[in-house]
Image: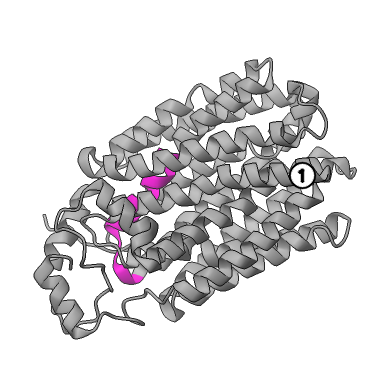
Amino acid sequence: MQLQHGIRPNAGQFVHLLLQVLLVGLTIGMMRTVVPAIAEAEYGVPRNSFLLLSAFVLAFGVVKGVLNFVAGRLSERMGRKKVLLLGWLVAVPIPVIVWLAPSWNWIVFATILLGFNQGFCWSMTQTAKLDITRADERGLTLGLNEFAGYAGVAAAGIVTAYMAAGFGPRTGLLVFGLSVIGVALVLTVFGVRETLPWAHAEIAAHHGVDPGRPTPRYNASVSVQPTTRELFVLVSWRDRRLAALSQAGLVEKFVDALVWVFYPVYLSQRGLTLPQVGWVIGVYGFVWGGSQLFTGRLSDRIGRHMPNVWGMWLCGAGVALMLAGAGVAWWSMSAAITGFGMALLYPNLSAAVADISHPSWRGTAIGIYRFWRDLGYGVGALGLGLAAHFSGAMDAAFVFVAVSMGLSGLVLYLLGEETHPLLNPAPAAEAQRNLDHGAT
């Protein structure tokens, strides 16, 4: 049977993959609101120990970043479904460790496993959707993917806050975590199909592309069968466009590291209850997730470049506004602005990378981009932890992130370009060269 690309002909599998990324979001979300807020009371983290508090997100970012890279390459050899399943199996001990943990070191170890889970599972939900959909649906596909994931993150933060208040933090997280991971394993085994055949079908179709038709600006300087090292160099610095996207991905994770590490503590120290903290942070996640329902689709029509740039700057402004006022309404408004900025850039940075990555190595290229992006958790957590430590105030971490976002957005504006193949197609001579090279 001939495989068809597109959301509509693959609706059943597309929905299964959306459920998967929702469960991935729920898994990370259970660690984001309650755990930092109870770090002092439950796990013995001294008050204002900024670097120690940042350690678990730093560990998460380094592990997830590396495993994004590994997952992309591994999925091209053993298939997307097996990598997804492996990621869920590694997640099983996480809620048990959080429940038993006598010290913060156990929480750091749990987030290392969480990084493994997220690096494999979130990467595969994204790559598998790109396998089965069309190029002109890429922004919508990634928008829906990130909507489902971050709606899960936001919902888990709120639900676990109430469960922690009702049943105690450890028991609440244990019940929630085991339920989510158990459902995910069952759905992976019985509901998810292997999508690698769709990627192979797309590669075969590219050999017959008419060079007169708008085609992406692939980099034709790589080998027909590029090595992992060759692709890592290409995405990280040799291709100016991919390098600009990678640095933007790295820096935008400073925002999420800040929300994860310091928002719960910052808001708790200013008198908010745990459910109130969950709702303020939930606004960030819900606006981020919900807005991607149209920001991804928007980039399919107006392009990726300027939504990415404006998203970086808007995020920085939202972070800075957290310090400019007080009260649940003000902090929720600031969180909403930050969330909308993330919605503009998050699916569209990935879509831009996918636009200019050939299908034969797209999984690896996305994995490398995601390596740099999620390494931003580690770099950001270290940077904001140091800023707060040496200044003696948490406010310095907010300033560090806001300034970083502004500068990174400027780099992206100057070094990046529009990648949408219909809005900035390869010239005819370049398209023919790519065909001859085997890159299209």
* Residue 322 x, y percent position in the rendering: 79, 58
The residue furthest front is: 390
The reply to whether residue 201 is visible in this rendering is yes
Query: In this image, 27 relative to 212: left or right?
Result: right
* Residue 412 x, y percent position in the rendering: 50, 69
* Residue 381 x, y percent position in the rendering: 63, 43
Could you tell me which residue is drawn at 57 percent across and 52 percent down? 253
* Residue 170 x, y percent position in the rendering: 69, 23
**Element carrying mark 1:** helix
Q: Any magenta on residue 133? A: yes
Q: Quadrant of the C terminus?
A: bottom left
Q: Any magenta on residue 152? A: no
Front residue (pair 150, 215): 215
Front residue (pair 279, 418): 418
Can you say whether 132 is above or below 84 in the image?
below
Could you tell me which residue is drawn at 68 percent across and 62 percent down? 403
Q: Quadrant of the N terminus?
A: bottom left
Q: Which residue position holds label 1?
A: 388
Can you say whether 273 is above or below 111 in the image?
below
Query: In this image, 231 relative to 113: left or right?
Result: left
Could you tell me which residue is drawn at 38 percent across and 56 percent down? 236
Query: In this image, 198 relative to 188: left or right?
Result: left
- Which residues are drawn in magenta? 118-136
Where is residue 262, by image quadrant?
top right
The reply to whether residue 208 is visible in this rendering is no
* Residue type, mark 1 in image: Ala
Main SS of residues in magenta: helix
